[in-house]
Structure formats: structure tokens, C-alpha cells
Image: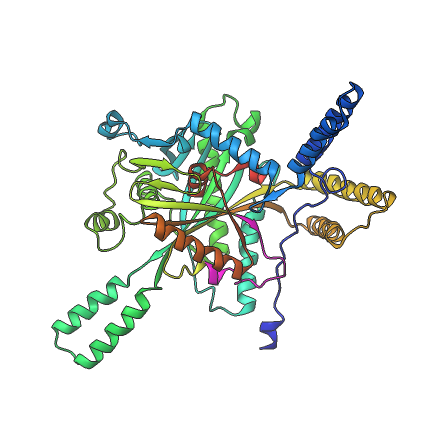
Amino acid sequence: MPAERDGRLYRFDPPDGAGVFLGLGVAQCALVGGGLLVSVAATTAGAPILAAVVPAVLGIAAAFARLGGRTAWEWAAVLGSWSWARVGRGRRWLVPVPLLLDGEKTPLPPCLAGLSVVEVPWRGRQRLGAVADSVAHTLTAAVRVASSAFVVASRAEQDRLVGGWGDLLNQFATEGSAVAHVSWSDAARPSGLGQHHQWLVGARQADVDHEAAASYSELLADASRVATAHEVVVTITVSRDRLGRRRNPGGGDEALGRALASSVEALLRGARDASLVVGDPLSAAEIRRLLRARTDPFSTREGAVGGRLVERLGLVSASGAGPMALETRWDSVRIDGAWHRIFLVAGWPRVPVGPAWLEPFLAGAGLNRTMTVYCCPVSAYRSRRAIERDLVKLDSDAAVREDKGRRVDARHRRATQALLEREAELVSGFAEMRYVGLVGVAATDEEALDAAAEEVCQAGREAGLELRSLDGRQDLAWGASLPLGLAPRHLLA
């Protein structure tokens, strides 16, 4: 057992807390500086002292006052986004009847605007399904992935599997790669142990031991409350902006389709080398079926008539794949018969963790929960420039603090050490990845959603995750949590 205790630990780099000046961010510097500038101008113009001080006080309050875990200027940004979204996207959306009757197109709400399910040539005469984004000019393919007993594997084997996943991501962090980002999305929902219950019914009809059948039925009743089924989908997205003029001379879709096909092949090879169980990329029909299941997980649960048709036959038409109705609220979004709430992983574990640290959170505990993590590969050149820039900024900030008589705190020293370690890893051949995590929870009504959200947040705290509800942007956040390639680019920047 000593080898188990002495296994490799993994650490998440601390967030950049140096800011632009004395630990202050751009927005805080602008608010404080703007308020002081207005106050000085008012004093010069002869305004009374009390009146002239007001802009400076308001600027400082907006930059530093906190309410509900956010500063005032952050609330202003969220409220502005919420107000603008209500004008641009509206609060309610219903599928237009002409598009519903069309049968060939998938009508999508404004938060999924620009997306369409297409087919791309692959391996000669075969075709793979892809999600085309006409706004970001990207193509996304999806693959179902499973792992062979990761949790019960030895610590050394877990480290090997994690290293294999790192090698898979590492191959896309090159200058010539067309891959914009890779994501994995785990959807957990109560399984109900339907097959076990069916077997029990057959066993009772076969006149087996009634005492044993009753004991087994009691066991199933207890286990059904926490039994969870998982579906893990890995997506890979290629961008036209990354192709370059030589590989994309006409700006057409053919070059982007070829880039997606070759990237999918590399993904499949890398996943198999990492001992992951992968199948062929999802077809267009399977992508629509996946979208339908993620939109309303309760309409496709086992035991429902429509659920059996969807699960067994995959009967999802193009017009019925997307949402039928959507209503956005401040802290939730209602889509068809399900209520959703999306959280941003605002903080990752602060202490080193083992390779299976996320397993208790992903277990699901009988909830309808999704977790999507986007990994954006950064080329070595861009990574080196960013490290040098951040190191210069931290050194300058430390010098200014010392000149002003302020101490350089432990967070500042830890950030500097993390950058130096990242630089050493880059020299050793390891690529840098920007990443962002989204956690979603679904329920049948608002009361159940609040209870499920509290359970998910508590499970996140136990795992070292800080979850923050994306208030005012729930519809956009729900779209980004789907395995469709809608990565939140401003969070990955």
C-alpha cells in the first residue's frame, strides 16, 4: 500500500491575481482612475468638496464593494448582459410551425443560432455527422468514449491512463493544428435498474424462492435511488481561422471537412493508445438523438413510451431534435419539460489531488447532472510569450509593491512559482491547455431543481470545486454545456 499513498499528485495552477497595477484588474483600475479623474476635474472647476468627492467614492465602491459573491462592477456586467439578451434573444421562444412541419431542418432557439447538423466525408464512402457553426466557422464531431475500470485500477495504472489522455491532447497543441478545442461531456441520470427489475419480474413468474425475491426487491429499492447511468461524449472542433490560407485557399467548407476528418482519425488513435474504449464518430442522426436526450432527459428515460422508441430505434426526426419551447429566467432555463441550471466551475481544487479525485462528484448520486470541460490547446510559441509576459508583469508588480511599502503576499509568490514550473514543463515538451468547466443540473420543476442544485453544489465543495451559477446567461450557458462545440470563448481567453 505505500505505493498507493506515494502516487503522483496533480495540481491546478492558481488564478492570476497580479492584475494590471497593484493587484487591480483593468475594470477596477478604470473605475478607480475614472472616479478620481472626475473628482479632480470637478474640484478644479470650483465644485463643492462634498460634491466633487462623490465620483471618486462611487468609483471605489463599484470596484471593491461585494454583494452575493460578486463585486459591483461584475453585477453591472451581468445585469447589462441580461438586459441586452432580453432585447436580442427574447425571454421566450417557441419553435415556428413552418419549420416544425418542414421535417428536414432542425429549428433551434437563439442561444443555438447558427448551428446545423451536417455530414462530412470520412474514410472514403462513409460519412460522419458534424455540427457546423456558421457564426464561428467551425465544425465539430462527437465520439462516445468509455474507460475500462479507471476507479478500481491501481494508482500506477490510473497515472498511466491520465498520462495517456494528456498525450492525446498534447498532439493538438501545435502551430499547424486546425483544432480549436477538445471537450468531454459526462451526462449522468438515474438508471432505475430497469433490467434488474425486469429480471425480478421474470424470476417471480418462474416461481423462485419468494424470500430471496423479496430480499432482492428490497435491495433494488434501495439501490435504485442512487443508481446512475453515464454517457461520456468527447467532441473535437476545427476552426476555419486555424487552417491558414495555404490549406484553405478559397475559404470553402471542403478544406474544413478534410481537417475535421483527419483530426477525428488522430483523436481515435490517441484515445485507443490511452486505453479508452471508443467507437466510430456519431452520425447525423445520432447527433440529433443526443441533442434530444440532453434537451429533455426526462422524455427519454427508460420506461416511457417515447423513451423506448428513442433509446431502441433512434426515431428522432430533424425537426424534432431540438427544443420545442424555451423560457429563460434569471437563474434557470426551462426547455420543453425540463428545468436546467448551469454552473461555472469558478474554482478548482487548491491542494494537490490524486488521479481519481473527481470520481465522487461524477458519481451522480441519482441526479440528472452534466459536466462539460473544454480544453483549448495552446501552441508552444504562444505559451512562451504568455509566460514571459506574465512573469514580467508579476516582477513589475512585486517591485511596485516594495517601492510603495506593501508586502508581496504568498499568493503572488505562488503565482510566480507556478509560472516558472509551467515554463519548465513547456521546455520538457508538455503542452499548455486552457480549460473551462460547466456543470448543469436538470429537474422536472423549480422546487426539485433548487434541491438538486444544492446537492450538486455540496458535492462540488466536497470535491474542491467552486460552482457559480451563471445568472442572467442561463440560455447561453446551457448551449455551451451541450456537446456541440459551443465553447465559451471569453472564458477560454
Q: Residue at x 69, y 48 (%)?
A: 426
Work out which quarter of the rendered image holds the N terminus and state it. bottom right
Identify the image's colour scheme: rainbow, by chain, secondary structure or one colour: rainbow
227 is higher (above) or lower (below) than 107? below
Looking at this view, name the residue that lies furthest to the top.
45
Query: Which residue range is magenta in the image?
Result: 345-361
Q: Position of residue 180 (x, y in %)?
A: 53, 37
Residue 485 appearing in the image = no
1 is higher (above) or lower (below) than 100? below
Q: Tally the numbered discs.
A: 0
Magenta-colored segment: predominant secondary structure: loop
Q: Residue at x 22, y 80 (%)?
A: 212
Q: Position of residue 126 (x, y in %)?
A: 34, 39
Q: Residue at x 46, y 54 (%)?
A: 272
Along the viewing direction, whichever of 475 and 424 lies nearer the viewer: 475
Along the viewing direction, whichever of 354 and 143 lies nearer the viewer: 354
Residue 434 appearing in the image = yes
**Left or right of 39, for residue 198:** left
Along the viewing direction, whichever of 288 and 177 lies nearer the viewer: 288
Work out which quarter of the rendered image holds the C terminus and state it. top right
Q: Is residue 357 magenta?
A: yes
**Left or right of 26, for residue 464:** left
Q: Is residue 445 magenta?
A: no
Q: Position of residue 469 (x, y in %)?
A: 49, 46
Along the viewing direction, whichever of 311 and 215 lies nearer the viewer: 215
Q: Position of residue 98 (x, y in %)?
A: 24, 25
